[in-house]
Amino acid sequence: MLRVIEFWLNGRRREVAVDPREALLDTLRERFGLTSVKRGCEVGECGACTVLIDGVSVDSCCYLTIWAQDKHILTVEGLQKDNGELSDIQKIFIEEAAVQCGFCTPGLILSAVEIIAAGKPRTREELRRLISGHLCRCTGYENILNAVERALRESLAKKTEPN
Amino acid sequence: MAIGDSIKRVDAYGKVTGQARYTADLVPQEAYHASLVRATVANGEVTGFSLARAQAVEGVVAVFTCFDVPDRPFPTPGHPWSVEPAHQDIADRKLLNRRVRVWGDEVAVVVARDRLTAARAAALVEVQYQTYPPLLTPEAALAEGATVLHPELRKDNVLAHSAFALGEVSYDEAAREEGLIEAGGRYEVPAVQHCHLEPVHAFAYGEGGRIVVVSSTQIPHIVRRVVGQALGIDWGQVRVIKPYVGGGFGNKQEVLVEPLAAWLSMQLGGHPVSIELTREEVLGCTRVRHPFVWEVSGLVRPDGTLVARRYRAWSNQGGYASHGHAIAANAANQFKQAYHDERALESESWTVYTNCTTAGAMRGYGVPQSCFVTECLTDDLCRKLGMDPLAFRLKNCMREGYVDPHNGIPCLSYGLRDCLTEGAAVFDWAAKRRAYQHQHGPRRRGVGMALFTYKTGVYPISLETSACRMLLHQDGSFTVQMGATEIGQGADTAFTQMAAAALGVSEERVRVISTQDTDVSPFDTGAYASRQCYVTGMAIRKTAQSLREKMLSYAAWLLERPADTLALRDGAIFDQTGQQVLTLKQLGMESCYNLRRTEHLAAEETVHCQSNTLSTGVCFAEVEVDLPLGRVTVLRLLNVHDSGRIINHQLAEAQVHGGMSMGLGYALSEQLLYDAEGRPRNDNLLDYKMPTAMDTPPLEVLFIEKEDPSGPFGNKALGEPPAVPVAPAIRNAVLHATGVAINSLPLSPDKLTQAFAAAGLYEEEAGEYV
Amino acid sequence: MYDFADIYQAESELDAVRALHEDRQAMVIAGGTDVLVGIRAGRYPSARLVSVHGLEALTGVQMTADGGLRIGPCTTFSALESDPLIARHLPFLAQAAGHVGGPQIRNMGTVGGNLANGATSADTAPALLCCNAVLELTSWQGVRRVPLRDFYTGPGQTVRAQDELLTAIAISPADCNGLAGCSLKYGRRAAMEIATLNCAALLRREGDQIAELRLAFGVAAPTPVRCPEAEALAAGAAWSSALAEQLAQAALRETRPRNSWRASADFRRRLIAELTRRAVTAAWQQTEEGM
């Protein structure tokens, strides 16, 4: 009893037949091979499966795929350019050594994308709160915060630069 | 770029794009999925099963029970094999267990076409048990008449006992001296879990009559051996592949699901079978850090001289031996090493089987526990003495030139005192210590510190060996293969830097193969004991030297001049005048395609490491305590590490941050709780409280870099140490802030408010907190 | 993959109500963060779900013609937290919504689900109790309105029948104007927490007096509760720290915290007293700032 649904995945319109019991996590991993979406706890407590739906971060483990009809879904696979060049936020995660085991990384990058898209300056404490839905055991969040803070600062600076 | 430079992680591109493949990303589409049936008692015996309902579920492929598996016990810890039977790990596990010794013990397994079906059917398996009272503490397990959990191995529940004494007199004799001040008491630490973000996962499939196991493991070569042991097949029949690993912290230094996955696949004609544990299973049914209970005491003179200490420890092993007494022994050693006792040190340790979750290796291997008790005692002594904790430590801590009197491990590069003094200066210790004296009111601040010692690798307690293979390619680039593993800590990047430095080329030319495949990768025991940059680093150095000689020798033949007139540096070959005479690309091409003589330039070397050296360090913590709510807010944390020369400063700092965060959780919030029946209560990441970004203070790191003469690049242990000193530093800061000594972890609000009440902090006088 | 029997995605409020009427075993799912986790834990075997996920008509905050507020039950915690009407009229409710889980959970979970599941730990319940929120329950038979105060019947239990859909959370003009409030949550961590205790205080000031106080707790009893004795004590009383202390003692008399492995009853009592002092003080201080 599959149901056909359509959504925008990383910028491309996709049609897929899914089991209505399927979590978006399962669909993205099993049907689209998007391995950046990690299965860490399956109950919305770790944030490793975070994706953006219409620009908003959600835990894809607790989100039924059938709810995604006509939505825009973004995973980190949709961030880099066609030639493989990384987006600014991905580069900054690497430069700031915010990546260790890598299991929380894609989800955190997507939260960073959401934070930057909001276009608001944020204090370090606000950033702590904005990434608090992600658990990380490797980094103590220090370099992740450094990366998000820098990416946000650079993005805001670009916006205010005169053309 | 060179050793010490902050080059970027070699695996980062894959990790920020999703290209890096972890075990779950490699499971074949057609694989079966296994779900374990776990015991719902902590102590008992399986007497029977009702399987019909499970077997009737559509999509179930097979159900196996503890009555179906071979009666062949095997060990699970990631230790090197010992050729001496007396030193081999205790073999007390079976693929599935009839005798249940922990809640959640694996008693049966359902294999199905998908994970959901397997889980649903596993829930329908009915198990009949004969049950015994659960033994949840060492006291209960040692009590008269307690069920002996492993009667075939031990006459009681003591897995092991050890003792040593140092000094001219006994502790009691030392205590007779006039005017000594004594402190001490009972201290305790709970079970905590690793919480690597990637769950435990392995899958296995048949290949030409052999078995292939793909696993998220720290120890691929050891997994191969243990799968061989568990299945009773030759080790060469097993091929283990380790892809990218999403953290291990010691839990994956254990052979957890690989033997069962391999056995199931073999029962099913080599069909791929995947065992991916749920988060609940990882938290409650794999391994934990050993809970400890201690009785310790210490004697000091009024001038601050540490005269004697006595240490008695009970380590709660849980149901199976795993790493066993090695943990308690390591703990006792660090208590001994950290301070100089003028007259006496007595130490005695028991490791006791109980029905709690089996304890194993977790970042620090007994030392986070031991550092807690060591540094609680130190500050309790300082308080009674009225001495500044920094001054006391400078006076009594491990001295330069130290050699452990029992295992002979030396401290070959000594930075401990510098850690204390430079850390104190950066932290502004003296001023803060003064500023936070005599506080009143409901919010109080304090500062505390803790120091530690930590060995580098396991020599001479156990074998240290490592191998490396390097190949020069046609384009002048190199691949480096090792059995040592990247598990998230940054090993491959450090190896890249080491190989580049030892070869005399830039890092861009060096590719470390991240995947281990025991059919291909050289032998190494794996990622544990903060050993890889030290031991594997030696193998890299030796292999690079060997390859350089081969390259120069071949270049000498090509150029028709003596090899000793040539030099390999800066990615090319130079003559004595400093003239570049050959590029590495030319060399690589000639070595493959020269019509007169080809010689594929590759080298493989083994090091048998027979050295060790102690790392040390100090953590400084500043806290604010909200007395009415019993809430501790950590305002600032500084870790200072004496780990020899740092290979990559940026990544080393990042690794230290992670350890500090783990220590923060150990201090304030983490604890695996059990009900009266031994069932874990909080086996999920909501109720098991690892710190979030909002719970974490700014993390500061300082390195005291002293070239270690034994390290291949002047380096010594760094991987585990950052997690070690944080909890006691925070505990001591709370003591400074409130005057209340909390002798157990975590510093939970329930516990704190009770202690504050008992200390009279809530008796208001004229509206003021006293 | 979740182990439930079926799911029907409703196209409208009425459609959902019809579906619940036609299948008397069906249960409602909205944000999913609670129901799906419960399904995974085996709490609702073979569940048949009626999804109201994302229904526009049930989403958002509106001001009613009389100046009251109407909160759609499918409004996410994030939306509630950042809603301009809530920010203007009931900032302490925004504060409470911001205490839920972490950002992703707040982006998914709904205020209606927070109430409908009957949990005493619901982070928005104490604030909504203080607002005298009235729940609109719609079934095929019609609509009934139940004050939140009368909604809970026990732990995880409410008066809502299987075929009733929570269709609005209504707050009257008198309950969302001229009041100052504070919501406090105590958990072991600063995020991703289930409350050890929740406390909300809402007051109206006249001169140097508290004209009216509303005080509510979560996890202080089997259901979220108001504290009428404390409220009566405060009505017309002059503000002082001694009054805050009296309120704390009254709140202790009116609550029944229990021992659980998450926290002892003694510790929860300590929290009840201390959070009462802090919440009432903070609410009062807001009136000072406003003057």
Image: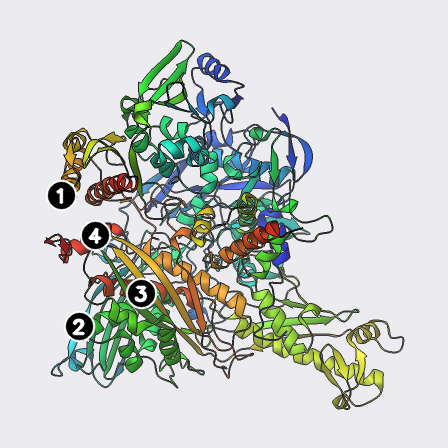
Residue B316 image position (x, y, % from top left): 31, 58
Determine the secondary structure under disc 1: helix
Q: Residue at x 30, y 67 (%)?
A: B448
Q: Which residue is mark 4?
A: B753
Q: Which residue is mark 2?
A: B384
CA neighbours of label 2 inside 10 A, class few (<14), some (14 to 19), many (20+)? few
Answer with left or right where residue B104 lies relative to residue B545.
left
Count every numbered label the image shows and give the total.
4
CA neighbours of label 1 inside 10 A, class few (<14), some (14 to 19), many (20+)? few
Mark sitting earlier along the chain (4/2): 2
Residue A106, compared with residue B446, is above or below; it is above
**Outermost residue to the left:** B766
Q: CA distance from mark 4 to mark 1?
A: 22 Å
Determine the secondary structure under disc 2: helix
Residue type at mark 3? Answer: Pro
Answer with left or right where residue B693 lies relative to residue A100.
left
Residue type at mark 2? Answer: Lys
Mark sitting earlier along the chain (3/2): 2
Q: Are marks 3 and 4 in contact (CB under 8 Å)?
A: no
Residue B400, compared with residue C73, is above or below; it is below
Q: Which residue is mark 3?
A: B728
**Outermost residue to the top:** C141
- The quarter of the image holding the C terminus of chain B is bottom left
Q: Chain of mark 1?
A: C
Q: Are marks 4 and 2 in contact (CB under 8 Å)?
A: no
Of A28 and B418, nearer the camera is B418
Q: Which residue is mark 1?
A: C242
CA neighbours of label 3 inside 10 A, class few (<14), some (14 to 19), many (20+)? many
Q: CA distance from mark 1 to mark 2?
A: 39 Å
Front tag of 1 and 2: 1
Q: CA distance from mark 4 to mark 2?
A: 23 Å
Q: CA distance from mark 3 to mark 4?
A: 19 Å
